[in-house]
Image: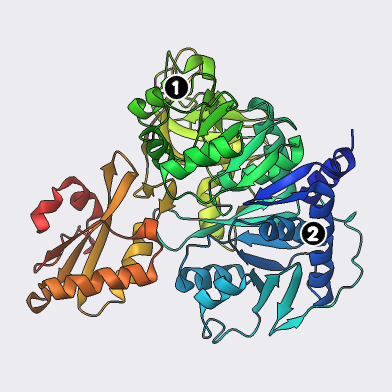
Amino acid sequence: MQQVNLLHELLDYQISLNPEKVAVRSHSNTVNYQDLGKKSDFIARQLNSMGYSAGDRIGLFLPKSVDFIATVFAASRLGLTFIPINPILKPQQVRQICEDSEAVAIVTSKSKAEVLGSRFLENSDQLNILIISDQNLTIDGKALVDTPIHSSNSIDPEHLAALFYTSGSTGKPKGVMLCHQNIVIGAKSVATYLENNEDDRILAVLPFSFDAGFSQITTSVWAGPEIVLFDFLTGSQLVSALIKYRITGITAVPPIYMALATSDLESKEFSHLRYFANTGGKMPLATLNKLRQSLPKAKPFLMYGLTEAFRSTYLEPTEIGRIPESIGKAIPNVEILVVNAKNEVCQPNEPGQLVHRGPLVALGYWNNKAKTEERFRDLSSIKGFESAKEKVVFSGDQVIRDKDGFLFFMARLDGMIKTSGYRVSPEEVEEIIYQFNGIQEVVAVGVNDELLGQHIEVICHVRSENLTDKYLDRLKKHCRDNLPGYMNPKKFYFSEEPLPKNANSKIDRSLIGRMPLETFA
């Protein structure tokens, strides 16, 4: 078997096996592996012509497309670090990611460049906007030159391949540093337990900026399935796509499965669907039962993961009828520990923090030493592993492990909001709202939601003259204009009184989280 250690070698491997096989299907268009490789090589040569080289960072602000996939492999071949940016983000969030990562270029489409606007590059002397269209990259309307590229033999498997931006409980999103090894071993591991093969047709329904969505690319290119690009809008459209393309596998988040479960499934035929896999939060039991009943030939996989370590656990389909609340056991090549506050490995049924060990552990957070040291620690810090020399990642999630080794999620250990499969920092939402005239104080909180996992509600301290419907309407528009849809608050509460403070004179988030929000109405 051909040696595969680097991300672009996944594509090279599949080209050597199945050059004429369809790799990607987008609407009515198809691209085989050989042509995907040619397109990727061409983009790499164009990027190389601008002098971009190993270690440079480039943002990918693109819709789900063949262009996105080809550019990923092009960046890998040059040793560049690519940054998938969710195409639904607003210019302010895109700018934050580019500034934090010190990106030298952002590859985008003409329509997405228009979203960024003509003022996007203001005060930026290093960032170029490259428009990708019909295989060509252009800057200021001029096509880049096609030049030879250097061999990638010097790229190490631990070379930084990608930055995936993810939110924590406080502050702006952090760039999780993934090396080639993280991505390649992750692809092989997931493809192994999902039993992906070249006869599969995988529906890519999640954003490629989400690590589970990006995994659809890598597992497909490793195992040889056809990947079908699909932007989710409604449950009925999803049903049509599953049938039209005779999809054999789908990975999605609970809100998508809830929409699917409420669609007309009984009258349809889904014998081709081999599995459906859930990630990004707990699927409601009623939804899971409905899907198992309506899709009896499809194996359900319940998965748990974190961007800092890609995938951690999954529940075998054979166990779902017995313990559907469990997040299962470690995926292949991974070890999961449960550790208490004394840094001791927990006994069965003792609550503790999930700690992920193995080759999928990321390199840390980009340019953020303090947060890296907080989450990525030496295994030797855990009692019983004093002589070990490796990094593990502390997830921030409280779990228990039963006597049979099955894990159960209990709670987050921080104030992060989990909505629609996304992690959202309260401060990300608050920062945008503070930009609106008249806001004195604001706190964003997550409220349990059967459909979304949590939705966002905010409490605002405003002056009495702003307690009007017109002010609220303007504030809602400000949020719609400056926040992606999943970060928009569902409900606003206005208070004339200052928000509760703790002993340090800071807003007491913990107290507010325990209070009925109607208190502030």
The residue to which callout 1 is attached is 292
Q: Residues within 10 Å of mark 1 (few under 14, many from 20)?
A: some
Of the residues under marks 2 and 1, which one precedes in the sequence? Answer: 2
Q: Position of residue 341 (x, y in %)?
A: 41, 34
Q: Quadrant of residue 284?
A: top left
Cα separation between marks 2 and 1: 39 Å
Q: Quadrant of residue 286?
A: top left
Which residue is depicted at the point 66% across and 36% down? 201
Q: Which amino acid, by three-letter code, is at mark 1?
A: Arg
Which residue is depicted at the point 19% across and 52% down? 512
Please state if 430 lies on the left or on the right of 501 as rendered: right
Q: Position of residue 189 (x, y in %)?
A: 68, 32
Position of residue 133 relative to residue 359, above or below, is below
The quadrant in which the N terminus is found is: top right
The quadrant in which the C terminus is found is: bottom left
Q: Quadrant of residue 456?
A: bottom left
Q: Position of residue 294 (x, y in %)?
A: 43, 23
Q: Position of residue 178 (x, y in %)?
A: 66, 51
Please state if 111 lies on the left or on the right of 68 as rendered: left
The residue to which callout 2 is attached is 40
Which residue is depicted at the point 78% across and 72% down? 52
